[in-house]
Structures are given as C-alpha cells and as structure tokens.
Amino acid sequence: MTLAMNGRAWERAAAPTPAHEVRLHVLRNATFEALRDLTAERAQARALKLRTTFSGYDPLLEVFGAAPDLRHTSATLILLTLDGLQGAWDGDRLDAGAALDIVTKLAHSALTEGTRSVLVSTFLPPIDAGPAFIDHAALYRLNADIAAFAASDPRVALVDVARFAAQLGEDAALDPRFWAHFKAPYAQPLLDRIGEAVAAHLAEQAGQIRKVVVVDCDNTLWGGIVGEDGLAQLSFSAHDAKGRPFHAFQRQLASLRRRGVLLAIASKNEPADVHAVLDHPEMVLRRADFAAERIGWGDKAESLVALSRELGIGLDAFVFVDDSAVECARVSQALPMVEVVQVPARTHQLPRVFARTPGFSSRQATEEDLRRADDYVAERKRAAEREHWQDRDAFLRSLAIVLSVGEAREPDVARLAQLCQKTNQFNLTTTRLEAAEIRRMMDSERHLVVHVSARDRFGEQGIVGLATVAEGEDGVLSIGAFMLSCRALGRSIEHALLAETVRLCRGRWGAREIRGRYAPTSKNLQTRDFYGAAGFLLESESDAGRGFVLPTSAEIKQPFVHRIESRWS
Amino acid sequence: MSSKVRHIIAEVIGVPVEQVGDDASPATLEAWDSLRHMNLIVALEEELGVTFDDDALSRLTSLPAILAELSRVQVAA
C-alpha cells in the first residue's frame, strides 16, 4: 500500500497543472454543504484545488459500516452538533466523555482508512436547548479534551468552532431558520471561519508555511524614530503605555522564533543606531535573535530579495511587517508572494496584527527548529569563511564536516517528517511523508529509510537529509523520497547520502539495479541532473519527470568525500 | 421579475437559463436538490432584497411558487 501511495504522491507532485489537488472529507451530523464552495475558494487562493465529500448524517454508520477509502484524502474534518448526537446529549444532560469518545473514534477510524490528517472541532452548546442549557462545565471539559487530543497527535489539528462562534456572537454564528428547515445550523460568517481554518490547514500540509518574518524597526519594533527622536525617546518598555504594544509584539516574535520561524530586519536607518536599540536591556529582541539584516537606504523589495538569497528560503515563505503604507505597497506590488502586514495606525492593535495572518506552522517544534536561528548565525560565519578559500574542496575541508548517515531510528521520525513537509528546493520527488508512513517503512523489510546528520566546526545541524527505498513486488528497487535541507546545500552532503543509500541497498538486497526519479516542481529544478551526475543512466523523460537507473555495479560519483562517523546523537 | 428570477435559478442550480422553463422545479431540473435549494433561497434574498417567511421556505420549490411568494411579499411591503 505504501509503495502505491508513493507512486501516486509522485504523480501528483509532477502534474503539470500549478494547482495542487487536495481532497477533504467531512464527517458530520448536520448540513454543512455550504462549506464546499467556501472552503474551495479559500483553498484556491492558496493555489490548492479542493474537492470535498460529505459523510451521511450519521457518521458513525459510515465508520462502523462501509468505511470509505480515505487514502487519497488530504484531511478529514469532524464537524458535529450536539443536537442529535446519540449517547452524548439526551436533551437534558451532556455526557462529555461519550461525546469525546465519538470524536476520537471517528478520528482514529479516518486515520486507519488512510486520511493524511484529521481536523477535530470544538462543540457549541446544543442549539435547540437555548438558554435552558446549563451544563457549561461539561461542555468546557469536552472542548478542552478535544483541544488536548489535537495537541497529542501530530496528525490531528483543531478547528476551534466554539472560539469562532464566541468571537462572532451567537446571533451572527447561528442560523435558526436554516437549522429548522434544512438542518443547517451555522450562518455564513461562522462557516467562513471554519472554511478559512480548513484551507489554512491544507495549505500548511501542502508545505505552504511562512518561515521568515522580516520587520521594519521604527514604529514597528519600537515606537518612535531612532534617527530623529534618539534612543532615549523610543517606546518599547513594558512599563509605559506607549511601549506596551511594541513590547507585546516583540514577545510574539520571540515566541515565533522559538517555534523555528526566522526573524530578519529590513530597515532604512543607520546600522549603528539600530544596533544601539537592539542592545538596550529592555528590548525583548536582541541582535542575536535576528538571522539576517538589511539596514541601509536601499529599496525594501530588493532587501527582501537579498534576505531570501542569504537565508536560502523562498520569498513565498516570507512575511513582511512595516508601518509605512508606501513600503507595504511597494513590496506587495514587486513581490506578490510575500505576505505583507501593515502596522495599524492605532498602535494598541499591534499585538493583533498576526491574528489574520495565518501560515506559521502550527506543529510542535523539533529540536532542530529550536536550533535553526542559531544555525543561521553559524551560516553567516561559514559564508565569511568561504570568501577566504578560492576552491570549493579547500573550503569544504576547512569546515571540518562530519556526517552521520545510516538507517533512521524512532527518535529521528518527527524531524524526518518535518523535513518532508518543509523541503522544496533539493527534493527529487517532493514526497510529503507523514510520521506514520515513515514508521511503517522503517518497520518494513521491503523499505529502507536513510537519514543524514551533519556537524562542522561552526555547529551542529542535526538531521539534514532523507532518502527512502522501496522494493517492489517485482524486486525492483526504487528510491522514493530523496531530499536535503536547504541549510545543508552546496557541501556535497547529498552525494554522501546517495552513496550510503546505495551501499545499504546492496547490503540488504545484493547487486540489483536501483531506480531513481526526478519529478519537477516549480522549485526543485536544481535536482534535475542530480542522479545523472552521480552515475545513474537516464531511462525515460516526460512532462512527469525523468526516470534514472543505476547499473548493478556502478559506483556513486562523489565530488567530495566526507568524514563519516557512527551516530553521535 | 420572472426573467431575473430565472437567471438566479439558472446560476445557482448550474444550468443554462434556457433550461429554466415557466414550470421549473426539482421535477424538471435534476440538479435542483435540497442543498442548491438552500443556496437559491440565500441568492434570491440577497439579489432581490427580500426576506422570506419561515413557513414559505420549504414551499418555494418551483418557479411559479417563488414568483407568487415574491409578489405577495412585495405587495405586503
């Protein structure tokens, strides 16, 4: 099954249409079909082509009767009303445990049937009960348990319907007329928010994640203009009313940084002025928190392009925050893929600016995340080093790189799954494996999962690459996923990963041909000739990509041979 | 009014307007299901600036019934 799924994932990634096709299944007990178009529109805005299917009105029947095949389903949304939810709500009393049981059963069943992720939603009070509903403690407990369930499993995410309804108010959230006539309880504004949350989840799952926040300084990181007002007059202290919103905003940025989002500065200022503010003890964010900076008098769109190049991260993963309408308009127009956020004129609203800016990863951060920002500081030092060395081999030797490469183990799984989700550039087939799939492959005799970790004299990078191999029914060995983090590019680490993968294949299966594929996307052009240059022969070429084969005795050509040590972590 | 309503029906149900005859209803238009019926009510209310009575909602399942209800609502208004 896994092999077939990989094949399909590859076809999908290689499809010539730019829109990525995704499927959503809704397990529900009321009429929510209006979500179909709403969610599709929001998905469309994220270059996703969405198809939605709905269960019958008793989703448990579907689960315990004829379960649908959810193997092509990107996400399954569980959206239930307490009204008519048998065993959980009898018209008088809410049984929170029974309701939670229904939700978790539906979630597990959908995952077993192959859906890639599940969206669970919080409950509203039973609609028909109205103000007669008094079992608030049970309802809060139920919703807290659902949120905790979502947090406990990386394949499960939360759609907080109860919070959306609270934000809108009951009158705007519910539609009593359509509820009475069509069993359609939610009004358009609530369905809008649900659709938006679902589309944001699907986009994240498809790898569309904002990874970098570029901030302006004056009236964005702090109140006031350092070049005119001077450091003493600036507002950023938590202890005065003018500074508090800026302090709160900096704390949000610091928390995003801890989740692995990179921070950078694009400011029209004198560098010394900005650095003096960043060194102030009452600033939350300090110089070391920023992975890169462009401080000067150049064009901001050009600064963003330069930051993208320096960080090795595409502009479509950038968020840009500035107080100037002119700068915001300039960047929006020149770089439409950047999410532009203008600081509100009323600065007390600054801590709310990200509320409507989705796209930061909602997943739990891995160890590498927490280290990533530091990595970029090390990377800057590496780049400086590079300028001292004329030829590439001498440069690589000077880095004193040590690799650990071999079969993946359980502690690697979370990071490997994250790598699959995030890697776009050096990714041969753009196969987005989930943790469960990686585990299945690790447990299977017919699969091989290979990781590579790297460290050098500037620091430790942890796991930076992944390859998977599958033995087909016919005994053919195929490399499925093959990717290297953009942080490890240009150091010939990909060749070490490939060589070790081939060595492990031959160790397990003996001398056999090994196949590899390149499936083009808009971002992975640099990998088009990777297999060819490494010694594979080009077998086939079409719009869907290129097929390669490595003859039984051929060696992998490595432009640079690294020192390899056994696993150190 | 009849032509405007026919156009709204055609758009919401997803058929060419020529297929929306004078007697259009779920019986003559297969695509006119209960879900599209909900969308149709929303579209009619938005486009024509009316609000249908509760008890009218499930009666409005044909072009003649919709037109009759519209003239009743608008006469009353």
Image (cartoon, coloured by chain):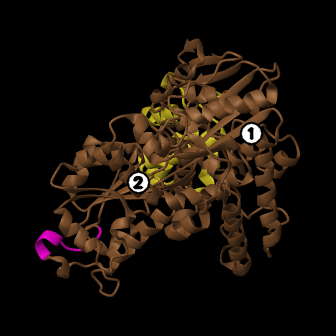
Chain colours: A brown, B yellow
Question: Where does the magenta region start and end?
Answer: A221-229
Which mark is first along the chain, 2 or 1? 1
Q: Crowding near pointer 2: few (<14 within 10 Å), some, many (20+)?
A: many
Residue A443 appears in view: yes
Q: Chain of mark 1?
A: A
Helix or strand or loop: what does disc 1 sit on?
loop
Q: Quadrant of residue A281?
A: bottom left
Q: Position of residue A296 (x, y in %)?
A: 18, 56
Specify the amino acid type for callout 1.
Leu
> Which of the pair A89/A343 is nearer the observer?
A343
Q: Is residue A318 magenta?
A: no
Q: Which residue is mark 1?
A: A70
> Which of the pair A385/A495 is nearer the observer?
A385
Q: Which residue is mark 2?
A: A212
In the displayed image of the protein, which residue is found farthest to the bottom? A239
Q: Chain of mark 2?
A: A
Q: Residue at x 47, y 46 (%)?
A: A487
Q: Crowding near pointer 1: few (<14 within 10 Å), some, many (20+)?
A: some
Q: Quadrant of residue A285?
A: bottom left
Q: Position of residue A198 (x, y in %)?
A: 57, 51
Q: Quadrant of residue A449?
A: top right
Helix or strand or loop: what does disc 2 sit on?
strand
